[in-house]
Image: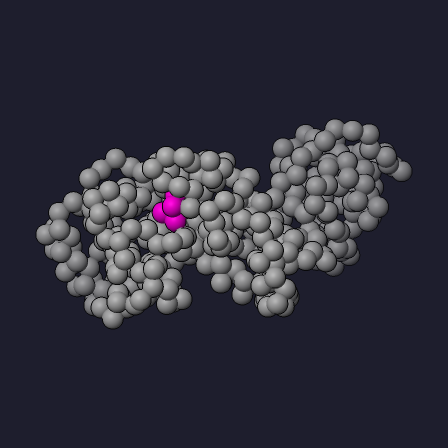
Amino acid sequence: MKIRPLAYGLIFIVLLTYGLHLGRVNSAGVANFQTRQLQETDPEVTVEIPTGATGSDIAKILFDAGVVKSSQAYFRTAVADIRSQKVAPGAHRLTLRLSSQQALNQLLDSARLANMITIFEGEWKSEVASSLVTFGFTKSEVQSAFKALELPPGFKSAEGLLFPALYSFPSGTSATEVVNRFVARFENEPVAQEILAAKGTYSPLQLLTIASIVQSEGDNADFAKVSRVIRNRLEIGMPLQMDSTVHYIKGVRGQIFLSTTSTLIASPYNTYKHYGLPPGPIGNPGALAMTAALHPAEGDWLYFITVAPGDTRFTRSNSEFVTWKFLYEKNRKAGAFK
C-alpha cells in the first residue's frame, strides 16, 4: 500500500511521427525566402498537415500556402534535419514568407498546433471521454466511438489502451477516428507490443492492470519496486490493498487519506476487499510503468509507503511498515503533503 497524493505525473508528450520519403518535388520556384526576424504583426495562415503526409507532401503544402517560396528548399532542409520526422498532423498556425528552417521550426512548435488533445499518464478513460467532450464532440459521439473500438483479445474496455501522449488532429476528424488513434498509438509502442504478446504467468490484461496500479501508486524512480511489491503479494496470496484502486472506484483524485469505510466498498476493483488483481486496468499507464510491470526490480518487499514527499520506503517487515506509517501520519498532520 502506498499513501500519497494521487497525481497525474509528468506529461509524457509524444507527437505522432511521419516518415520522410525521398522523391520528386514539384516547385514553381527555386529561391527560398531569406531568413528574417519575425514580428508579431507578420501575417499568419492555418495550414493542415494530413495524416501520413510525406516530406514532399508537406513541402508542397507549405509552398501552396505561401509559407515558403520553394518547396525544393524546404524539402532539402527537412531531409537534413531528423526532427522533420516528428511533424505532427493537424492544423498549424504558420507565418507567411518564412525561410525553410523557420518553417520547420514552426511546424515543430506544439504551441502553434490547433486541435490538440493530451492524455496524461494514469488518466482514466472517463477523464479522457470528458476531454473529448470539451474538445467539441458530443457525449453520444464519444460513447459511440468507444463502443466501436476493436479491442485486443481478453479486453472488455479501452481502459489502459489509451496511450498517454499529446495528439493533434486535422479539422473534421471524427470522434471514432480520434479514439482509434489513441489505441493505435498504444499498439505501436514497443513495450505495449511486448505486453500484448505476453504468454507467461500473467496475461496481457493482467500485466496492463499491474502497470496501471504502478502508474498510480509510484513515482517514476520507484515503478520497478512497486511492481515487485505487487508481484510478491500476489505470489503469496496477500491482498494488494492499493489505495489507488479505491480512488478509481470512487472517481476521486488528490486524496492521501483513505477512510476505513472506503476500504469496505463493494466492488471487484477494491483490492482491500478482494484478493488478487482487479478485473482490469485502473487508468492508462505510460511506457515506464508498462516496462516496470514487465520487468520488476529484484527484492522481497511486501510494503511501501511515502512518509514525506520524495521519501518512499520499501520493506518486508510489517512492524517496520507500521513504524513508518506513524511517521507518515505525523508528517501529514504537520502539512507535509499540502
From the image, which quarter does the C terminus lie in? Answer: bottom left
Compared to residue 165, the image places residue 40 above or below, namely: below
Compared to residue 243, the image places residue 193 above or below, namely: above
Compared to residue 78, the image places residue 13 above or below, namely: below
Q: Which residues are magenta?
A: 206-211
Magenta residue check for 42: no
Q: Nearer the viewer, residue 249 or 311?
A: 249
**Residue at image location 70% in from the left, 53% down from the top:** 170
- Residue reaching furthest right? 28
- Residue reaching furthest left? 319
Q: Position of residue 164 (x, y in %)?
A: 50, 50
Q: Nearer the viewer, residue 63 or 189?
A: 189
Instruction: Name the colouring of the figure.
Output: one colour
- Residue reaching furthest bottom? 261
From the image, which quarter does the N terminus lie in? Answer: bottom left
Q: Nearer the viewer, residue 154 or 75?
A: 154
Is 127 situated left or right of 43 in this image? left
Main structural element of the magenta stretch: helix, strand or loop? Answer: helix
**Residue at image location 35% in from the left, 54% down from the top:** 278
Q: Position of residue 117 (x, y in %)?
A: 58, 56
**Residue at image location 42% in from the left, 36% down from the top:** 198
Residue 244 figure quarter: bottom left
Is 84 situated left or right of 269 in this image? right
Is 300 situated left or right of 128 in this image? left
Q: Position of residue 163 (x, y in %)?
A: 51, 48
Residue 323 figure quarter: bottom left
Residue 221 visible in image = no
Residue 141 figure quarter: bottom right
